[in-house]
Amino acid sequence: MDLVEKEHDRLLKRVRTSQGINNVQATIDLLQSARDTIAADPNQAAVTLAKLQNPVKASFNAINDSLKETHGGLNKYTKSLDKIFKDRPLPSTEHDALSEQEHLINRAIAMHLLREGQFSVAATFLSEIAEKKALMQHCESSSSASPEPASLLNLDEVPSHEIRKEFASMYYILSQMKERKNLLPAIEWSRENREALEARGSNLEFELCRLQFVWLYHGESENPGGNHVPGNWRAATAYAKREFHTFLPRYLREVQQLMGAMAFCPNLQGSPYSAIFNNSSAWDDVAQFFTREFCSLLGLSADSPLYIATTAGAIALPTLLKLQTIMKAKRTEWTSDNELPVEIPLPPSYLFHSIFVCPVSKEQATDENPPMMMPCGHVIAEESLKRLSKGSRFKCPYCPNESHMKDARKVFL
Amino acid sequence: MAAELTSIKLNPESHLILDQPLLRLPHELARRNFKTVQRVVEREKEYVLPALKEAANASLSNTHTPDQTLAALDAMISRMQGLKRKMQSLQEEEKKIQTQSRKRIQHLEALYNIPSLADVKYDQWSRVRLDRLLVDHMLRSGYSESAKQLAKERDIEGLVDLEVFTQCQRVVESLHRGETKEALQWCGENKAALKKSQHNLEFELRLQQYIEMVRTQDPSKKIDAINHARKYLVSNQDPDSKEIQRAAGMLVFAQDTRAEPYKTFFSHDRWKFLSDLFIQTHHELLSLPSQPLLHIALSAGLSALKTPLCHSAYTSSSSNSQSTTTSVCPICSTELNELARRMPYAHHSKSYVEGDPIVLPNGRVYGKARLLDISKNVGSVESGKVKDPTTGEVFDESEMKKVYIM
């Protein structure tokens, strides 16, 4: 990369000096002065013109020389680019399975834009898709050929109106939270969805209310002219009295902590509770927590899947490319269509599911070949189990226990 | 632990695979620009030098009056001034291209300063990359307005090639309308580079013009068609080639013919073929990959993330939307689920499960700590009981059984 930068620097410098144009100007000056001489004294014409031949030729040569230099610079830059990208061609384009599913990609993009709060871009995008679709349908009806299945075009390819509304309200709540430190819309939302949140074991509502309490405490005192009280504990305790009783059964300890902290007022810094009140990342954490819960209630992942997938793709590409070249060189083909032949080293945060690889067959468990637990608690894949037991009692491959096929139970990871 | 460290290491060199066009494209443009400069200089040189010589000879032999000499010099000066203007505007163009390249190099350079994939900076960088890929995809699919808007809102206009694609799109649309003019003009501008191309775009375009003339069945138009073929088709191709013979044969067929290959010649689908050919030639010339980069990244990413559980009939215990301690897997999320259905899943050689796994009587496996944590937070569960976050069933804590997964 350093080399690329160096070569590019040279190019940029050369552009700035504009050597070529200066040479052209010099030629013009030559011609102009000759013209002036001739105009002043027509008798000099022959001599002046004869004298002019060589300088003009020379100045054209100078122009060409500077062009050559530029050309050399461009070529050097090309070479530096080749060097950095060498042996790293883009993957072959033989089978682009995704291009047949353009509508699904577009849907994913539209959803991504909505997630990111890019509502106006999303709207433009959707209307442009609709336009193109209309145009294509028009073309198809006018030309008799290519009767494409109409169902394909009518597939639900745009996010529904409800989803758009949901994301709009999510963005409203988040912007209120982040820009104006206003938690009330979020609290209201969590109240409306209290049952669903509770079923998930989520304490979002309490987290929000606790932050609201902290925010109130740090807020401006209502009568700043009066006695100097750091923090507005009056507003905070009033809020606690009003709101916290619903949380008492589940969050008794946490509420007690908050109330206990009030006893230290105004010297909260020195209290054992200061961490609760001086948590700089609290707002970001809560915003992230809220986004996750909001998306989960819609059955969606918290981070944009498109983002995670493309990032994972960029991480995976070098490995996949290497594989492609090896397979080409050895003229082999991967026999199993539904599993990649190599392991791709993704960061741990990109692992979402538990993964069960049968310790006997080294195959990943699937619906057809699920993990089975023997009475001793060891798990192997069903096919391995069948092969081992052959219908009779058999020993667990990992411990001395013997068991029977029918004692094994399917487990869900 | 060692494996974990290597998996988050960022190797910038190999990480830039997707970003080649980012530098290649402006470079191709710069080279094209340079060739234009070379051409105009050459043209003026070929005019001025002989003209000067001639003027000198003429005034030596006194065949020119002084006025004529002055006029000749004036003509040369004005040509040179024209050259200067052209060079200046081309240089402006080049400056623009190179400043843009500079920004792009800096953007890529930033990757070299990020130590690990887990770094927050990588996250930001990768988001910019996604935006770039999205714009690329939109431009290629012809959604130029969206592309423009997205580039503007994300402030990445210097990192995407709006102009190049918009121009390409304009030509494609004109071909869809059944016009060859803009495409031919493009061919004219890139004549030198096109000579190396394996596709004969210009010939196909001229052939289409010929076809349109024959289509009318008007005798005078047919004469025009023959003249057109003489001028453009035969000069481009070996006169005995199959294409020329077929084109000649076309003259006796009407457009509703069912005889091949004339039926294909007359077909309106040929315009689609032409626009595809144009796109292919255009992208090759500018060393752009033929498929959207987003597709390349996505298909690799979908496979890398996919597990057999993503399209399983059973809800996964480890990643689902039913509990707050798990996040939904991106492949399971509705956005990508259908797209990933036909992709292969990732290969794993080791099991990966939560720490301290236990199994419930219904066969579901959870990390013990996580299950206890969820059950504590779910208000409706009394102490000593655990609630299965996936199915909602409640069990006694004593019913949890240790499970060994190797």
Image (spheres, rainbow, N blue to C red):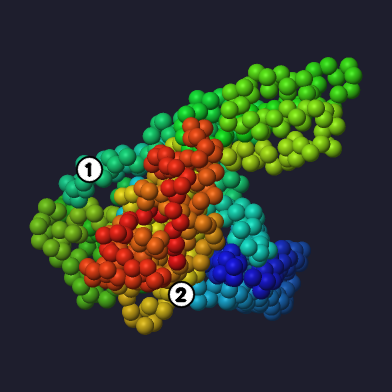
Left or right side of B70 for A145: left
Tell me the residue that label 2 is attached to.
A322
Compared with residue A234, is residue A260 higher up or lower down, i.e. above or below?
below
Q: Quadrant of the N terminus of chain A?
A: bottom right
Residue lying farthest left? B258
Q: How many marks?
A: 2
Residue sitting at x 33%, y 79%: A332
Tag 2 near tag 1, CB within 8 Å: no
Nearer to us in this view, A317 or A11: A317
Residue sitting at x 47%, y 29%: A195
Q: Position of residue B123 (x, y in %)?
A: 60, 54
Q: Position of residue A167 (x, y in %)?
A: 49, 34
In the image, which disc is placed on residue A150?
1
Q: Quadrant of residue A276?
A: top right
Nearer to us in this view, A140 or A206: A206
Residue lying farthest bottom? A330
Helix, strand or loop status at disc 1: helix
Helix, strand or loop status at disc 2: helix
Compared with residue A133, is residue B161 higher up or lower down, i.e. above or below?
below
Q: Amino acid at mark 1?
A: Ala
Residue sitting at x 52%, y 32%: B379
Q: 10 Å neighbourhood of mark 1: few (<14), some, or many (≥20)?
A: few
Q: Chain of mark 2?
A: A
- The answer, for residue A253, to whether it is visible in the render is yes
- Residue at mark 2 to residue at mark 1: CA–CA distance: 40 Å
Left or right side of A134 for B91: right
Q: Position of residue A348 (x, y in %)?
A: 54, 60
Mark 2 on the same chain as mark 1: yes
Nearer to us in this view, B314 or B8: B314
Q: Amino acid at mark 2?
A: Lys
- The answer, for residue A185, to whether it is visible in the render is no
Q: Quadrant of residue A270?
A: top right
